Image (cartoon, grey):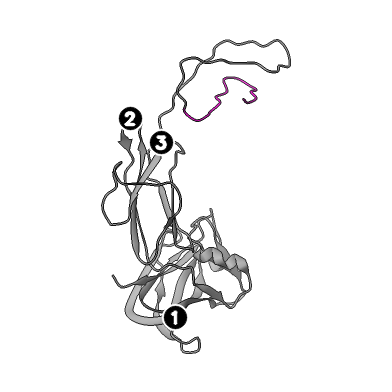
Amino acid sequence: SATTIGYKRILRFPTVEATQLRFSITGSKCGAVISKIGVFRAPQILVPPEVTRNQSGEVLITPSDEESVVFYTLDGSSPTPASLKYTGPVPTGGKVEVRAIAHDPSNGESSPERRESFDLPRKDWRIMGTGDERAYAVIDGDRSTAWHQGAENKPVDLVIDMGKVQDISGFRYYPDQRLWGPGIISHYEFYIAVEPDQWILADQGEFPNIRNNPVWQAREFVPARARYFRLRALKIIGGEHETGYGEIDVITLP
C-alpha cells in the first residue's frame, strides 16, 4: 500500500511471482480517474558488492541490489554460485582476502568480482591521547565514517596501541570521503614503538595528488616490531585547522 500524487508515479516493491493483480483505491480527494495502469519488472543491478571488515573482525558484504544473492570465498579463489553463500557477518582473524559476487538466480547472471584484502584484526586496538569515543571511527572498518581533530597548530598526532607487539612493514591512510571533507593530510611522519616512550621514525613524506584522488594511501618501510604507532600530520590541504581520518591501518609481511 502507498499514497500517490502527481502524474505517472512509479511505486516500487520487492519482486514477486503472480498470476493476477488487484489495484484498490482506498481514498481519494475527488472522483478517481485512471488512464492507464501497468506493472514492470526491473532487472537487478549487478555491480560488485561492497566488502568491509569491522573492528571486531567480522566481514560484511553488501550488494547494491537487495534482491541479489551474494557468494564469496576466503581462500583466494574466484567466487561462483557454488561458493559460500553470504547470510550475515563472517567472523575472521588475521590476514584474509575476500572475494565476492552478486548473483541473480532468475537469469543466472553474476556481477564482476569484488576483491578486498584485510590485514591485522583491530578488535584490541586502542586510541591514545583522547577521550572522544568518536575517534574509533578511524578503526571501525566503515569507510563512510570519519573523525576530526581540531588544532590551530601542526603537527597533530594520532596514536594507537595495537594491544601487543606486531611485525609491521607499512601503514595505510584513508581520508574523509565526504564531499569537500576537511582535514586531508598531505605531509606526514609515521613513528613506531615497542614502549610508548621509545619512538622511532619509520617513514615520512607526502601523499601526492590526494586532494584529487582521496583513496587508500599505502606506504611501506623496513619491517620492524612495534606495539604502538603514531601518524603525525605535518600539513593539511588548504591549510585547514582540522585533521581528518576516515580509516587507519597497518601493513604486515606476507
What residue would you read off at disc 1?
A: 227
Q: Nearer the viewer, residue 218 or 76?
A: 76
**Sequence-wise first label, 1 or 3:** 3
Tag 2 residue: 107
Which numbered disc, 1 or 3, marks the residue closer to the eye? 1
Residue 34, compared with residue 80, is above or below; it is above
Q: Which residue is mark 3?
A: 45
Quick one: label 1 or label 2, which is nearer the N terminus?
Answer: 2
Circle 2 packing at 10 Å, graded few (<14), some (14-19), many (20+), is: few
Q: Secondary structure at mark 3?
A: loop
Q: Which residues are magenta?
A: 1-15
On the image, which quarter does residue 173 sit in? bottom left
Res 129 → quadrant: bottom right
Q: Secondary structure at mark 1?
A: strand
**Image position, residue 132 (x, y; %):** 63, 70
Tell me the CA gap for discs 3 and 2: 13 Å
Q: Say left or right for 77 vs 169.
A: left
Q: Position of residue 169 (x, y in %)?
A: 34, 75
Q: Residue at x 32, y 43 (%)?
A: 112
Which residue type carries mark 3? Ile
The quadrant of the picture occupied by the N terminus is top right
Q: Amino acid at mark 1?
A: Arg
Q: Is residue 4 in sight in this rendering?
A: yes
Q: Looking at the image, which is closer to me, 184 or 5?
A: 5
- Give the farthest residue toward the left: 77
